[in-house]
Image (cartoon, helix red, strand yellow):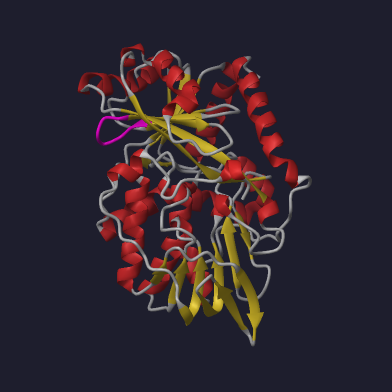
């Protein structure tokens, strides 16, 4: 990892401060065996481990830091339905059988997630108050209306909001339209991750922290995962490292781009101000080339998120464009302190779709949520567990593809900066 990419341990964030006491999972020591070994202690790895353990399977999770250290414990907390592309586009891309499965799965993922939280009694400030996709200019408004029409045609609980309705629901007159989806919502992502880890452990999964997997190789018909102080011999392996993917599997790191997503948080704002901004507490993300997203959390803090510096930050002053934009939306915030600013790496794929790979017998790889990880990763855990057990009761809901490195991947930092600048210019001029 190059010096500018080094991050504090544990990473500073509002979530870290408010998560309460967290269990520290021990490092792997010595040689162990498991039927399934999982690399990565984020949403994907923990949900998969939970569902495997609940089915009575023997599973071990190896996390390089501690569960929730990566994007699973730092993200915007938005539980949003769907994929990047509209339903009609997904069906055109993947056909009349796989396409509808992808649509049903991705748009149903929030219901799965909130249902899982309720079943496990995870205390994580979960609220299913809906998602608003907001449009500022005519081009994104047309895109929002197209999405809404396609969703409505499929019987989804969405509706179009006119300028007056948008102003009432967001407290600003900046938006000319929006789409409301009742299935979305929000939560405290680190509390959720901690709860998933505890539930998986209680179900029988072994979870090891501070256990970076240094090598993965085949020996005598089993997979050997080696860490600094131990090893696990497994029949099957799931790699679920997302934006923190390294060189563990050939070309995998080069198949995605780790992009920093940043969040600024205020002190708890006055109840009247919080009620004016988002009175019904939906989450909001803006339609456009470079999105901004925000929510009011359970303690009346405003959390503003978007693309930030391509290096770790630990203060809101590093993302002043987000805090300045908040004041433009809601002048009543003047004088409010921005107490926290942090970021983390999300995995962006070339096609902006989740990537599932099975490069060799017994190896399953799942990564590339493109900023849509909470709901999708939670739901993926259940179907990945079924596949790892060989007990699938229905066709797999996502395409399975070979690992394909991105050309000129070594130049990705320059490419990301150029893409962000280009996207912001396009958004400014309505392109």
Q: Nearer the viewer, residue 108 or 254?
A: 254
Image vertical order of residue 300 relative to residue 128, above or below: above
As for residue 422 lying within the magenta part, the answer is no
Residue 214 pos. (x, y %): 59, 67
Image vertical order of residue 299 relative to residue 354, above or below: above
Image vertical order of residue 165 relative to residue 7, above or below: above
| Residue 223 seen in the figure | yes
Question: What residue appears at the point 32 percent right and 37 percent down from the top-left corner?
Answer: 129
Q: Nearer the viewer, residue 53 or 252?
A: 252
Q: Is residue 4 left or right of residue 111?
A: right
| Magenta highlight range | 295-301
Q: Is residue 275 left or right of residue 84?
A: left
Q: Is residue 258 left or right of residue 333?
A: right
Q: Nearer the viewer, residue 270 or 362?
A: 270
Q: Nearer the viewer, residue 30 or 57?
A: 30
Res 155 → quadrant:
top left
Residue 175 pos. (x, y %): 46, 17
Residue 297 pos. (x, y %): 30, 35
Question: What residue appears at the point 67 percent right and 38 percent down from the top-left corner?
Answer: 413
Magenta stretch, main secondary structure, is loop
For the C terminus, which image quadrant? Answer: top right
Residue 43 pos. (x, y %): 44, 56
| Residue 393 seen in the figure | no
Q: Is residue 374 left or right of residue 273?
A: right
């Amino acid at each position: 990892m190059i010096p500018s990419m080094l991050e504090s341990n544990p990473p500073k964030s509002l979530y870290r401060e408010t998560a309460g006491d967290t269990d520290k999972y021990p490092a792997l020591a010595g040689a162990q065996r498991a039927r399934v070994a999982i690399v990565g202690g984020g949403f994907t790895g923990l949900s998969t481990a939970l569902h495997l353990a609940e089915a009575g399977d023997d599973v071990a999770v190896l996390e390089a830091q501690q569960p929730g250290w990566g994007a699973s414990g730092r993200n915007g907390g938005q539980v949003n339905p769907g994929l990047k592309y509209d339903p009609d586009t997904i069906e055109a891309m993947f056909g009349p059988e796989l396409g509808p499965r992808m649509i049903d799965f991705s748009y149903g993922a929030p219901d799965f997630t909130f249902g899982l939280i309720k079943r496990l009694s995870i205390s994580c400030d979960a609220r299913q108050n809906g998602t608003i996709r907001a449009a500022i200019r005519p081009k994104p408004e047309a895109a929002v209306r197209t999405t809404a029409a396609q969703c409505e045609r499929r019987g989804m609980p969405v509706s179009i909001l006119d300028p007056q309705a948008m102003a009432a629901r967001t407290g600003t007159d900046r938006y000319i339209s929006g789409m409301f989806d009742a299935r979305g919502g929000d939560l405290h992502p680190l509390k959720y991750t901690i709860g998933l880890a505890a539930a998986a452990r209680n179900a029988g999964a072994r979870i090891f922290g501070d256990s970076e997997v240094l090598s993965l190789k085949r020996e005598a018909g089993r997979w050997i995962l080696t860490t600094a102080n131990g090893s696990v011999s497994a029949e099957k392996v799931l790699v679920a490292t997302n934006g923190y993917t390294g060189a563990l599997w050939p070309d995998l790191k080069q198949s995605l781009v780790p992009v920093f997503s940043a969040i600024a948080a205020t002190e708890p704002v006055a109840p009247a101000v919080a009620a004016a901004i988002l009175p019904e507490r939906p989450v909001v993300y803006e339609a456009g080339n470079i999105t901004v997203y925000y929510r009011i959390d359970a303690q009346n803090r405003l959390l503003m998120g978007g693309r930030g510096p391509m290096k770790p930050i630990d203060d809101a002053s590093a993302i002043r464009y987000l805090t300045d934009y908040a004041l433009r939306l809601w002048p009543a915030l003047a004088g409010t302190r921005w107490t926290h600013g942090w970021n983390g790496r999300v995995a962006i794929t070339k096609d902006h779709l989740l990537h599932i790979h099975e490069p060799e017998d017994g190896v399953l790889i799942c990564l590339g949520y493109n900023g849509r990880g909470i709901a999708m990763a939670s739901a993926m855990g259940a179907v990945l567990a079924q596949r790892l057990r060989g007990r699938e009761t229905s066709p797999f809901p996502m395409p399975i593809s070979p690992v394909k490195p991105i050309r000129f991947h070594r130049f990705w930092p320059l490419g990301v900066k150029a893409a962000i600048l280009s996207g912001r210019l396009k958004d400014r001029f309505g392109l």
